[in-house]
Structures are given as structure tokens and as C-alpha cells.
Amino acid sequence: MDSKPRGFGTRVIPLGEIEVLEAEHLEKIWETSDGRALFYKPVQVPDGFHALGCHARRTEVPDSLLLLVRGSGVTAGASKPAPLAPPVDYSLVWKSPVRNENETAMAFWLPLPPAGYKALGFVASVTKPGVDEVACVREDLTSDATISNSILASSSSSVSSSSSSVFTGLFQSLWSRLLMSSSSVADNNTVESFYVWQTRPREVGVTAKGLSTGTFYCSSSSSSPLPSIATLQNVSFDLPSSMPSLQQLDALVKRYAPIMFLHPDEDFFPCSVEWFFQNGALLYSKQNPSAPVQITANGANLPGGETNDGSYWLDLPRDAAAAEKVRRGNLESAITYLHVKPVFGGTFTDMQFWFYYPFNGPATLKVGLINVKLGKIGEHVSDWEHLTLRVDNFTGNLSSVYLGHHSSGTWYQPSDLEFDSTTTYRPFVYASKHGHALYAHPGDNLQGDEERGLGIRNDTKRSSFTWDVSKHQLISAAYLGVEEPPWLQFMREWGPKIQYNSRTELEKVFKFLPKKIRRSIEDIFNRFPNELSGEEGPTGPKQKNFWTGDER
């Protein structure tokens, strides 16, 4: 075994009996005739490493990595067979139709593993591959996987040999068709439909050990339930050996943390949690609601507990002037709160940046060219928003960016974002007026029926109100033993629940609208998140399911 370093940013990550390397060199071997689905194989594979299968994607721009694997030299005892083994044979899954004499059929092959091992990918090859083309992995070193993004879903009319293709598709497949003999497929010229998906671990979260290998799953059918498929797992789960250190985290923040633009007409600004507490925020209890308690600067007197049982909540100061001051926030005091967690078995790092606003302002309805302010609808005390930077632990490069907006969000490739012209790496993001949802570009970001111009506006625009997200406090990184602040353990609501008749509020709006579009607006409101239908404070970051799981 060589003496190259292993761990974060070294391209090699140990998983116990095996270690994985991110393939640096890929060669395009086939693409469908419309150029939308592309297939690659690793080349210049370093000594000792093996491919698990070929790679598929929808554009020339990489959107995922491909892993190579080798034994690490660590053994699990004399009774265990080797961690890797060659397949015993291959089964032909599908062969591209040939439409003229200039085309060459591409075939897709399923490796057949020896007993006790699993195949983790498929091979695209004109001829039957050799058994040394890929490695199979001992079953106890693998984890359950599932299909994710569709790469190709095509009938016979759109798949042919050439050099290019990508599609959207179904999420089911027929295992028995994958195991049919080479001759039965080759002789059956009617089997021309073909389906390809990327794969990912079935479980994703801070304790899940499954990796994304970058291989794909394919079938000539989409009509039956998906069989069990596998991926690698990080058996050792030694996170400090693959995740960034404190010093490396600091460098990543300085390199990739975005610059945020708040709307030029924003009325409700962010602040630090400490500023919120020090300026009169109050803790209320169901047991004694008439006697609220002043909160200490670090939230040490907030009650803990693992669930939101409704026994406590926070609110603005009682004094009207003080409440208005806190409602407006304080941008100068604002810092971001950083939570760092492993994903995909510790081969990626999610850096979640959380933002606190004391107040979420009212929403605005767009009806064609008309904008209607919605009064109380959308207002609530406290607003927690977040974005996530997903970092590739093999290279330390930014892999993707998640921008949360209301109860959901969107993943972006770095190439989809705007970047600071004075640097190479720091992206721009935009917070919407009053609601503070995050978007990649300026615009009205309509939430509703964009085609008809009906819905809630999430206006974003460049302004002089900027927030440097790199100004942060690390509040949680379990693998580094980071001590969490007391306020993070408050699992109840950060604002009061105020009941009012949403129908009454909507009627105030509807009376100004033509009758023919009222029904459309009502339908849109029925699909909106709860935060628009009443005034209720959100729970804190640790109560969100994506604190430990994957983003929505």
C-alpha cells in the first residue's frame, strides 16, 4: 500500500477494509442520438484501484463523481474473504438499435457477482467486458441504495447508437429482465426501450453510512417494482479521517460562504440571537402566561427538552416601542450560525448556515399587473432561514448549494449561481422581501401560477443591504465535539401562536378582485405553507428534519 495521505482533500477516503478514490479522468464512450444522455468510463486508473461500473449524466458539466475502490490492507479476520472480487460473468441488459451501417451498437452489461458479493454498477461496452473490468464488493461492506435522478427514459423511437442523450423517467424496473441471457436480448430486436437512473444510498443523514458511488442503474423495462440495489458503506465511519478539521472549515467558509443581498425595501432585518435576547425578548409559559421571563444573553434559562410540547414560547417585548425596535432587527449585529454534518457516509460535508430574523413581514399577492398587500397574512414573530453548502470531501471543492425558501428549497450547481467578481468562488444569494426566502437570482420568484401571473411574490433585488455569510459562529459539529449554545436546545416555538380567521383576512383581499379569478387565487392559497395561513412562530433549527436528514 502506498504512503499517500488519506482524508479530507486528498482524494482518498478510508472506509475500513476498503478505501475509495475519486476518479480524475473519465472518457466519454457513448451518447444517445439526441445528445442528452452521456456515458463515461474511468481511464488512467491508479494501480490497485478498480472501477465499480460506468458513469452516466445529462450534460457535459459534471454533476456527480465516480468512485474507484481498492482494498485498504485492513483485515476483518482470517474467516472473512477478500473485500473485492471480480464478477464471474456478465448479463446483457440492453443493446442500442442500429439504424444505418455507420452506427455501432452499444451494449449495457450487468456484472454477475460471486456468492457473498454484490455488483454496484453497470458496464457500457460494445463487446462483452472482461472480468477484470470492474470489481464486486463483499456484501457486508455494502449498503442498500435506490434510484434518484432519471438520466434516460426512452422508447425505441429516440434511442440509437451515436454520441449523445438525457431524459426524465419512471422509478421502477424489472429485475428479471436484467438477468436475461445475451442471446435472448440480441435476437429480440423489439426490445428497444431503455431506462437509466443515477443511484444514491437509500438512507441519507448524519448517521447513515451509505455512499454515492457515481454509477448508474439501467433496465429495458419500467413496468415492475425496483429490485434491491447496493452501494458502498463506510463501515468504519471514522468521520475525523474524512471530514474537514476546524482549520479546514474556517478556510472553506472564507472561500465559499456567500454574499447575501437583502431587498432594498426590506423592513425586517436579521440580527444575532444574542441581540434579540438582550433587547427584551420574553419567555412565556402555558402554566403562567401572564408572567413572562426575560431571557439571558446566551439563552441559558430557556427550558430544554427533545420535543415541542407547546408548554413554552418566545415573544417580543411588552413595551410597544421596544417591540417595534426588535421587530425591525439589527443588521449590524447579525451573524450566521453554522452547523456542520456528514452526508453520504462522510464523503461529503454539509455546511448549513442558519439566519435569524426577529420578524417575518406580510406577504404581497400578485394578480397580473396588480400587487395586493395581504395585511396580517404571512406575519409571525421569528423567522429561521438557511442555506447549505455541500462540499466534496475528496477534493475540498464546492459540489452544490441548497437555498431554502419557506417549507422547501432548491439545489443548485455552482455554475448556476452568480459569483462575486472580485473573487473566484464566493456566490451571491438573494433574500426575499419580508419573507427572507433565499433565491439564486433577482426577480419576483412567484409562488403560485407563474403562467397566469397569480401568486405570492418573493421579491429579490440587489441592494446596499448586504450580509457577509462568512461572519459566523460554529454552533454544531458533532464529529469535532463542538459544544452547542444553550439556546439551540430550546425546541419550542420562537414566537406566539395568534389565532385569527384566515378567511376574513382573505375576504379583505378578494373584494378587490374580479370574480372570475377569485377561485384561482383561493386554489393557490390552499397550496401555500402554514406560515401564510396564520401567525405562529417557527421552531428552532434542531427541530427541522433536515438538521439530521437531507434537505427537502
Image (spheres, rainbow, N blue to C red):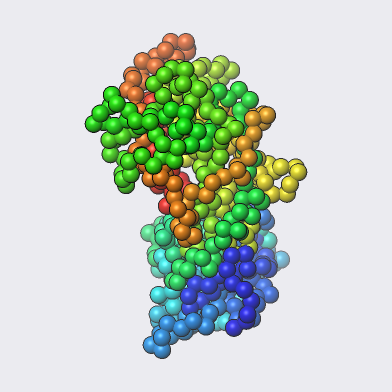
Question: What is the x, y in percent for residue 182?
Answer: 50, 75
Quadrant of residue 289 in the image? top left
Residue 208 in view, yes or no: yes
Q: Nearer the viewer, residue 235 or 359?
A: 359
Q: Tally the numbered discs.
A: 0
Q: Indicate whether 419 appears above or below 36.
A: above
Q: Residue at x 39, y 14 (%)?
A: 507
Question: What is the x, y in percent for residue 530?
Answer: 39, 31
Q: Residue at x 48, y 37 (%)?
A: 274
Q: Indicate whether 288 appears above or below 307.
A: above
Question: What is the x, y in percent for residue 198?
Answer: 52, 59
Residue 544 in view, yes or no: no
Q: Residue at x 43, y 17 (%)?
A: 320
For this orientation, the residue located farthest to the right is 422
Question: What is the x, y in percent for residue 312?
Answer: 31, 34
Q: Residue at x 55, y 29 (%)?
A: 330
Quadrant of residue 429 in the image? top right
Instruction: Assign the N terminus to one quadrant of the image.
Output: bottom right
For this orientation, the residue located farthest to the left is 287
Q: Indicate whether 284 appears above or below 92.
A: above
For this orientation, the residue located farthest to the top is 511
Relative placement, left or right, of 391 versus 289 is right
